Image: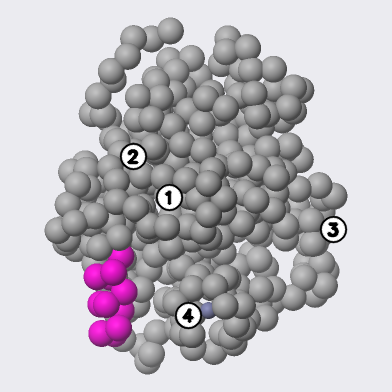
Amino acid sequence: MHEKGASCSGCGASYGLERPMFRCPGCGGSLEIEFDYPKLRKAAPRFRERPFGHARYAELYPVRELVSLGEGGTPLIRSRNLERELGLGFGLWFKLESQNPTGSFKDRGSSVEVAKALESRPGKGRVRAVVASTGNMGASLAAYSAVAGVSCTVLVPSDARAVKLMQIAAYGSRVVRIPGDYTQAARKAEEASGRGAWLFGDYLFRREGTKSVGLEIADMMEPDDVVCPVGNGTLISAVWKAFNEWKALGLSRSLPRMSGMQASGCSPVARAFRTGTPLAPMRGRTIAVAIECGAPLDGSRALSAVRSSGGFAADVTDREILRARQLLARREGIFAEPGGATAMAGIMRNRERFARGSRVVCIVTGHGLKEPRTPVPCRAA
Ligand SMILES: [Zn+2]
């Protein structure tokens, strides 16, 4: 175990990890785990002796043993058609997170979160857990809870897609619809955790598992830019942490620019970036329900990743998202859900912001089969 403690993004306070915490007890801010990097440098050469995948980077997770369903090790493939057909002028790679066990990148975080819940259980009783989710995280935690014997309840917002709820129920978790949006569901989940349930979600342990998206990219190439969709902001801040850790371990010399794409209907991070103001919550709707988070838990970390890496945050309309989704499917053979096509939509809209000849990685976060019935409003190119 190489983790030293947790620090708060809001007030900068530091905490030990003896008792589980989800937010800063002082200010309610988001917590992040810090590792002993000089000590970890000794473990780093062992990474590449192991199979490529999430478990390769075991020392970089704050658990003794992962709960695994074979997550990670997803393909990083170069565009075969769109890079040329759109005349982008830079190299475009897709990180296909849709190929994880439950169809989204959430499985990486679940493998760490569920392991942590098992390690922290008081006595030997069955762990009861609760999570708020627009669908993908709930489906992922339902699968990992099933294999680990955790009793999981998933609170979903009123507009959650029926097909996603079917996936959650198939793994045996309980689904409860909360009147309102994701932010209200997240509040309910935190209240339930105050009554003794273990809290899953975009908190400090999940971010550590999600890092492996970035670790795997860094392991294969040194990109100039990495582009992520942004909902709660956990993915982009986890990928940024991963690249920084990879560098701290002496495994690379450069860091990529991190850019975050949101749906115009719900874009607090993009708005804060554009106006140079602090993050302010907003209420809004988008067809990309997987990233519909009006009060993003890791919004300030996402902004900080974008600003300190020299990247940018921007938003794209639902129509642009659906067009990117269609092009990915028809020209690259990649079927993404709307949230999963948002980074590509942002790259298309902001192509002049990427340097000619640079290497850009686009993260495709969730499989199209999760929302196969989303309307297709535009004709193919
Ligand atoms: Zn704090």
Answer left or right for 279 relative to 32: left
Mark 4 and mark 1: Cα distance apart in space: 21 Å
- Whether pointer 2 and pointer 3 mark residues with C-beta atoms closer than 8 Å, the reply is no
Nearest to the observer: residue 226 or residue 173: 226
Q: Which residue is mark 2?
A: 265
- Please, what secondary structure does the residue beneath circle 4 have? loop
Q: Label 4 amino acid?
A: Cys
* Nearer to us: label 1 or label 3: 1
In what quadrant of the picture does the N terminus appear?
bottom right
Q: Which residue is mark 3?
A: 250
Is the CB atom of the residue marked by disc 1 within 8 angstroms of ligand 1's nearest atom? no
Q: Which residue is mark 1?
A: 268
Is the CB atom of the residue marked by disc 4 within 8 angstroms of ligand 1's nearest atom? yes
Mark 4 and mark 2: Cα distance apart in space: 29 Å
**Quadrant of res 297:** bottom left
Tell me, for residue 291, which label it has, or none: none
**Quadrant of res 124:** bottom left
Is 236 drawn above or below residue 25 in the view shown? above
- Residue 17: x, y in percent? 56, 84
Disc nearer the start of the sequence (2/3): 3
Identify the residue at horizontal 28%, vertical 56% (top origin).
182
- Please, what secondary structure does the residue beneath circle 2 have? loop
- Answer few, some or many: residues within 10 Å of disc 1's Cα (few below 14, many 20 plus, some between 14 and 19): many
Q: Label 3 amino acid?
A: Gly
